[in-house]
Each structure stands twice: as structure tokens, then as C-alpha cells.
Image (cartoon, grey):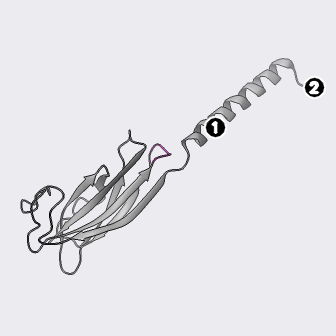
Amino acid sequence: MIKHRRLVATVGCLAAVGTAGVAVAADGATDIKVAPAPTLAAGQTAPFDAAGVKAVRRGKPIPAGYILVGQTVDVQRGAKSAGAALTFRCPGTTRLRTFGVVGNAGFSAVDRNYPGHRQTAVMSFPPPRLAHSTGTVYAVCR
């Protein structure tokens, strides 16, 4: 036979565990969509200032020899931390110079020694205070 105190303690523990499960379920799943963005080539307008590349400036034509390869990231947040792993590869014999962002898709290069390489991986994370964010990450290739 269960004693009254043990019954109350057991019901209290079950209620606490049940409430925690509901709180986690309320967050729901994070929906992340990644799609290729149109590649921008010489003569088209640059959408950002490329850090470390003086030739690529926002609102100015992209100079000859540069190609901007992009991926658009759309995140509908459910979990507190979720992101996307993106791989960028420069076309032909071009090499990575830097990255740029349009919108509110934050990013971090996995390998910091990417300049001069053809390919690298990038992690994209949305700002922590936004429930929905979208943006495009571009690799500047030359």
C-alpha cells in the first residue's frame, strides 16, 4: 500500500516532468531552407562591401575577374540554437577571397585559412532574438 506522502511526492515529480516535456515541445522544430542564390558576375552591382577586397563595394559594379557565389538561408526558429552548414566552391580556377552577407544570416567560416582555396565550409546561424530570419551568404571569388 502506498503511503500518502509517497503518493503526493510521486504525483509531484510526474507533474514536474510532464511540464518540462511540454515546455520543450512548445519550442517545436526549427525549419531551415538553403537554396542557391543567383551568381553575381563582373558588371553587376555588388550587394555589400567585401571585407579585405577594396574592389568590391556596395552599389558599385563588380570588377572583371570577380564572381560572387551565394546561398540563401531561411530559418524559422523553433529550437534555441540551430543553423546550417554551407559549402562554397569557387568556379573554374578562381579562389576564395572573402565572404559577405545580405540580410540577417550570420555566419562563421569553419576554416579561417580559406583565402586562396577553392572550397570551404561555413556555418550559418540566425540572430538569437529573431523567430524568422533570411539572408544570403556570398563567397567572393577571383
Q: Marks 1 and 2, Cα distance to the nearest angstrom? A: 31 Å
Q: Which mark is residue 97?
A: none
Report the residue marked by disc 1.
22
Nearest the viewer among 74 and 82 is: 74
- Residue shown at 43% from the left, 60% from the top: 33
Answer whether residue 97 is magenta in the image.
no
The residue located at (28%, 51%) in the rendering is 103
Residue 72: x and y in percent read 34, 61
What segment is highlighted magenta in the picture? 77-81
Few, some or many residues within 10 Å of mark 2 (<14, 14–19, 20+): few
Residue 83 shows up from this direction: no
Q: Are marks 1 and 2 in contact (CB under 8 Å)?
A: no
Mark nearer the viewer, 1 or 2: 1
- Marked residue nearer the N-terminal end (1 or 2): 2
Neighbours of disc 1 within 10 Å: few (<14), some (14-19), many (20+): few
In reply to whether residue 79 is colored magenta, the answer given is: yes
Residue occupying image coordinates x 93% and y 25%: 1
Q: Is residue 87 left or right of residue 13?
A: left
1 relative to 40 in the view: left or right: right
Q: Residue furthest bottom?
A: 92
* Residue indicated by mark 2: 1
Residue 65 spot, x, y in % from top left: 11, 74
Extreme-right residue of the structure: 1
Q: Quadrant of residue 58?
A: bottom left
Residue 22 at x, y percent in the picture:
63, 37
Residue at 23% of width from left, 64% of height from top?
139
Residue 32 seen in the current view: yes
Looking at this rendering, what residue extends furthest in the top direction? 5
Rendering quarter of residue 23 = top right
The image shows residue 47, relative to residue 79, as above or below, that is below
Amino acid type shown at disc 2? Met
